[in-house]
Image (cartoon, helix red, strand yellow):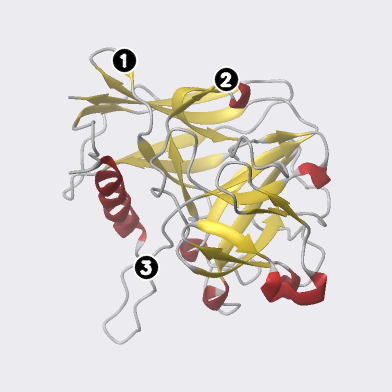
């Protein structure tokens, strides 16, 4: 089986974990959105920046990462809305109307912001996939002491201001999120590493569910400028319980998973491993890394 097909199958099985069961009389939720999002600069190179000097420097693009299969993390075709909040999702920081915060994706690549009309956000040219990058500004300063912001992306048709637990009409189970920092250098991260015969593998998928229940996909990569050293790198994580989910994929039949506390994690009935990572309250100047270690055979 090809690498891309195996990774895609792993992501599908992982995504199934996020579907909330519904009573028989209720319409089922739509399935979680596949693919990934990243923050970057206007150039889109590299795709997964997380630390910025200025709020205006932050742009949005879609996957994949440097070492991921080309079509493993592309957003499905459609129109999407985005917002910027504090890490908890409580405080809406975006200052313009949500109608101004839309873009289209085709073939896994962000195409344009035409659905937003005259109030559309600025765009750049993605130097890796030829698509567009979308500026997140304008938005307010974060209320988070660590300088952390969270960007949300959801299909526009999935916005639901009456859904339980929605964050300014963005439903976590239908949203992709990514965290980043502005004018704050302290590193608080979760890193998932995949080991086979003593070698850390590249291009392995780790599914991240944040404290709100929104999700994203990260791939192990070697990008020292991004602080990613052969690991799936989840940066600027907020305090609370996050979940990293991994599954068998091309090149990695999992034999063991060790959580951030050093505990051995057992596979669920569906063969996936769900690792709870408890991130402590941020302390000024403290660099903290929480590691999930995956052994492959």
Q: How far, Cα to Cα, is label 2 from label 1?
A: 17 Å
Residue underneath mark 3: 31
Locate residue 17 relative to residue 190 in the image: left or right. Answer: left
Q: Please name the residue shown 30% across and 55% down the image.
A: 12
Q: 94 or 77, which is in the foreground?
A: 77
Furthest-bottom residue in this view: 25
**In the image, residue 1 lies at what x, y percent?**
17, 44
Q: Would you name the residue on which mark 1 appears? A: 199
Q: Residue at x 23, y 43 (%)?
A: 2
Q: CA distance from mark 2 to mark 3?
A: 35 Å
Tell me whether circle 2 and circle 1 mark residues in contact (CB < 8 Å): no
- Indicate which label's residue lies in the foreground, 2 or 3: 2
Helix, strand or loop at disc 3?
loop
Image: 103 above or below 36: below
Residue 145: image x %, image y %?
76, 38
Residue at which label 2 appears: 224
Which quadrant of the structure image shows residue 252? top left
How far across and down, in percent of the image, does residue 39 sit? Answer: 64, 44
Q: Are there few (<14), some (14-19), or many (20+) residues within 10 Å of tag 1?
A: few
- For the C terminus, the image quarter is top left
How far apart in space, not on screen, are marks 3 and 1 (Cα)?
35 Å
Look at the image and tell me whether residue 261 can be seen: yes
Pick the front one: 77 or 232: 77
Neighbor class of circle 2 (other Cα within 10 Å; few <14, some 14-19, many 20+) is few
Helix, strand or loop status at disc 2 = helix
Residue 239 disc label: none
First of labels 2, 3 by sequence position: 3
State left or right for residue 113 relative to residue 17: right
Horizontal and vertical percent for residue 241? 48, 42
Is residue 166 found left or right of 136 in the rendered image?
A: left
Q: Residue at x 66, y 31 (%)?
A: 282
């Amino acid at each position: 089986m090809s690498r891309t097909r195996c990774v895609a199958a792993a992501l599908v099985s992982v995504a199934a974990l996020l579907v909330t069961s519904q009573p028989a009389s209720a319409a089922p939720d739509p399935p979680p959105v596949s693919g990934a999002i990243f923050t970057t600069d206007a150039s889109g190179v590299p795709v997964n920046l997380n630390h910025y000097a200025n709020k205006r420097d932050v742009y949005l693009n879609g996957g994949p990462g440097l070492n991921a299969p080309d079509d493993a993390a592309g957003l499905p075709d459609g129109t999407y809305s985005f917002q910027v909040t504090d890490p908890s999702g409580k405080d809406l920081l975006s200052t313009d109307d949500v109608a101004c915060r839309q873009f289209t994706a085709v073939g896994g690549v962000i195409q344009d912001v035409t659905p937003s009309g005259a109030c559309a956000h600025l765009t750049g040219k993605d130097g890796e996939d030829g698509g567009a990058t979308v500026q997140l500004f304008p938005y307010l300063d974060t209320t988070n002491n660590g300088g952390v912001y969270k960007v949300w992306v959801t299909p526009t048709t999935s916005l639901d201001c009456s859904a339980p637990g929605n964050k300014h009409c963005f439903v976590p189970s239908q949203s992709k999120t990514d965290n980043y920092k502005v004018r704050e250098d302290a590193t608080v991260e979760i890193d998932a590493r995949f080991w086979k015969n003593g070698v850390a593998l590249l291009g392995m998928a780790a599914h991240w569910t944040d404290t709100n229940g929104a999700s994203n996909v990260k791939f192990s990569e070697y990008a020292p400028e991004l602080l990613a050293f052969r690991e799936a790198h989840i940066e600027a994580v907020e305090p609370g319980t996050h979940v990293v989910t991994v599954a068998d994929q091309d090149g990695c039949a999992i034999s063991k998973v060790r959580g951030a506390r050093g505990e051995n994690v057992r596979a669920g009935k569906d063969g996936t491993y769900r690792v709870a990572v408890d991130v402590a309250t941020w302390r000024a100047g403290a660099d903290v890394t929480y590691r999930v270690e995956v052994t492959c055979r």
